[in-house]
């Protein structure tokens, strides 16, 4: 049997989708003759062509549509990425499965594909806008590449590379797997990430960057993780950091854990200028994350700061950042964080341009013995009180949701949860079945808590004994 794939347009992601379709059709049925031709647009009158591409106006949110009869018809989507998602959905309906990242995780049926077997009529809009995974743990190029390659095959659409250069994650693997080759350097990691960025973009995935570590660029260098800065910490720099217990110093010796004195206009301006500069120089990133300290109970106690909620200062900075980006003509989306002290909603300040920002809810101390849905069956727990530098983090799901609800009263823009099911909790569930149930149930009910998806903060190589938790999250 002969299949003629009509690739529409010249978009790289659509071209990749057409190639993937051709490759997998041949793998399913080696007797097929599969050819590709280029078209400017969809032609309903064309005979014997299976069109792959998009000919309608682009939409940000994913949607797939498949109409194939007798080996011809169309596979399309709301955007170029959706075309790739649609190709994988079509292949799934032909029997292909991608149970975990990597070549050993795929199942490709071997069968003859008749015109009847190729028939498929299917349309689908994903339940949530954000369906992604974050780099974490101990990484190699292959492990991260396999994850990026796997995401669209199971309907996911985003990948997040933390830090400016995530040397910390690759160095963890390098330190515990010594070889005869020279040790990995931050420059090596930057080159690895440039290659991974190409893989993210060819698949049309939404690309997230940075997070913690914005104090490093204030010293003239990128954040690699929890490492000492190369540049000297000057008295001028220390004058801008938070005053805690009567001292202005690097918190615990870790710059990534240190807060600034956010009442200090110069400190705010320097950090925000670094973010604007990074946005200008990183046009490939769809979302830049602006997070504060990775530690808690270390907010500035100076006279100007001590009576102001950290989130009021945070929102002030978000508004200032929006003004600076707008002045530069940059439309970069900025992700702000609900984590540690930032879980407590602002009282005085409000985000003015809500279209600029995405709210990220990170309930890092939540219990994984209960689900989001399970916590909504009884009386709602009141939010915990905020006491400066004496906060106690909520341990229950509802305790975290109580703080989220206060934020949602003040911000009605885009949002997602940044959760940790596959970061630590899975280690207490050797078979992965219980955490898979919790994770799958949480995903089903994100709309019930007013959240539009999840970017999972998790290990990349997490498939022992199976990849059920991550696969269940995707499905």
Image: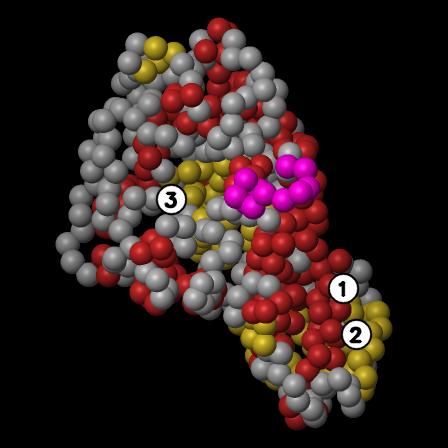
Against 187, residue 229 (above or below) is: above
Residues 16 and 286: in front is: 16
- How far from the left and from the top, in percent, is residue 268? 48, 19
Measure the alpha-carbon separation of dots 3 and 1.
36 Å
Q: Which residues are magenta?
A: 173-183
Residues 113 and 37: in front is: 113
- How many marks do you count on the picture? 3
- Which quarter of the picture shows residue 385? top left
Regarding mark 3 in the picture, which secondary structure is present there?
A: loop
Q: Most prominent secondary structure in the magenta stretch?
A: loop
The residue indicated by pointer 3 is: 362
Residue 15 numbered mark, or none: 1
Side of 93 relative to 431 (left or right): right
Residues 55 and 291: in front is: 291
Residue at image point 32% right, 16% down: 244
Q: Which residue, as the protein is rendered here, is positioned at the far top?
A: 235
- How far from the left and from the top, in percent, is residue 26? 74, 80
Instruction: Give the mark toward the camera: 2 or 3.
Output: 3
The residue indicated by pointer 2 is: 6
Residue at image point 40% right, 32% down: 294
Residue at image point 79% right, 74% down: 6
Regarding mark 2 in the picture, which secondary structure is present there?
A: strand
């Amino acid at each position: 049997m002969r299949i003629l794939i009509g690739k529409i347009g010249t978009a790289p992601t659509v071209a990749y989708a057409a190639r993937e379709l051709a490759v997998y059709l041949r793998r399913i049925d080696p007797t097929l003759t599969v050819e590709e031709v280029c078209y400017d647009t969809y032609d309903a009158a064309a005979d014997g062509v299976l069109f792959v591409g998009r000919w309608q106006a682009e939409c940000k949110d994913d949607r797939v549509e498949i109409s194939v009869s007798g080996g011809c018809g169309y596979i399309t989507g709301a955007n170029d990425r959706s075309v790739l998602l649609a190709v994988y959905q079509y292949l799934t309906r032909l029997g292909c499965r991608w149970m975990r990242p990597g070549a050993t995780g795929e199942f490709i049926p071997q069968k003859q594909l008749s015109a009847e077997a190729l028939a498929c009529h299917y349309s689908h809009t994903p339940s949530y806008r954000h369906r992604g995974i974050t780099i974490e743990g101990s990484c190699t190029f292959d492990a991260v590449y396999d994850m990026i390659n796997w995401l669209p095959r199971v309907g996911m659409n985003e990948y997040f590379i933390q830090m400016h250069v995530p040397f910390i994650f690759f160095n963890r693997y390098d330190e515990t797997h010594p070889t005869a080759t020279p040790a990995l350097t931050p420059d090596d990691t930057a080159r690895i990430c440039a290659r991974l960025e190409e893989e993210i973009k060819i698949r049309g995935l939404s690309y997230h960057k940075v997070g913690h570590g914005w104090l490093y660029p204030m010293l003239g260098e990128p954040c690699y993780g929890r490492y000492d800065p190369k540049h000297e910490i000057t008295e001028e720099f220390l004058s801008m950091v938070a005053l805690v217990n009567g001292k202005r110093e690097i918190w615990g010796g870790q710059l990534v854990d240190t807060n600034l004195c956010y009442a200090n206009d110069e400190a705010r301006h320097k950090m925000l200028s670094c973010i604007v500069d990074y946005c200008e120089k990183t046009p490939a990133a769809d979302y830049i994350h602006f997070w504060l300290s990775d530690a808690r109970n270390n907010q500035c106690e100076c006279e100007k700061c001590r009576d102001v909620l950290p989130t009021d200062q945070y929102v002030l900075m978000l508004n200032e950042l929006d003004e600076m980006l707008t002045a530069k003509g940059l439309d970069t989306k900025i992700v702000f964080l609900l984590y540690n002290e930032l879980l407590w909603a602002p009282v005085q300040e409000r985000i003015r341009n809500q279209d600029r920002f995405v709210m990220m809810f990170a309930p890092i101390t939540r219990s994984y013995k209960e689900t989001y849905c399970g916590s909504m069956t009884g009386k709602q727990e009141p939010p915990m009180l905020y006491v400066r530098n004496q906060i106690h983090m909520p341990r229950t799901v509802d305790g975290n949701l109580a703080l989220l609800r206060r934020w949602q009263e003040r911000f009605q823009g885009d949002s997602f949860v940044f959760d940790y099911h596959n970061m630590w909790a899975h280690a207490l569930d050797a078979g992965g079945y219980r955490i898979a149930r919790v994770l799958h149930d949480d995903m089903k009910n994100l709309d019930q808590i007013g959240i539009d998806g999840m970017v999972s903060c998790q290990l990349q190589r997490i498939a022992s004994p199976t990849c059920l938790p991550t696969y269940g999250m995707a499905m």
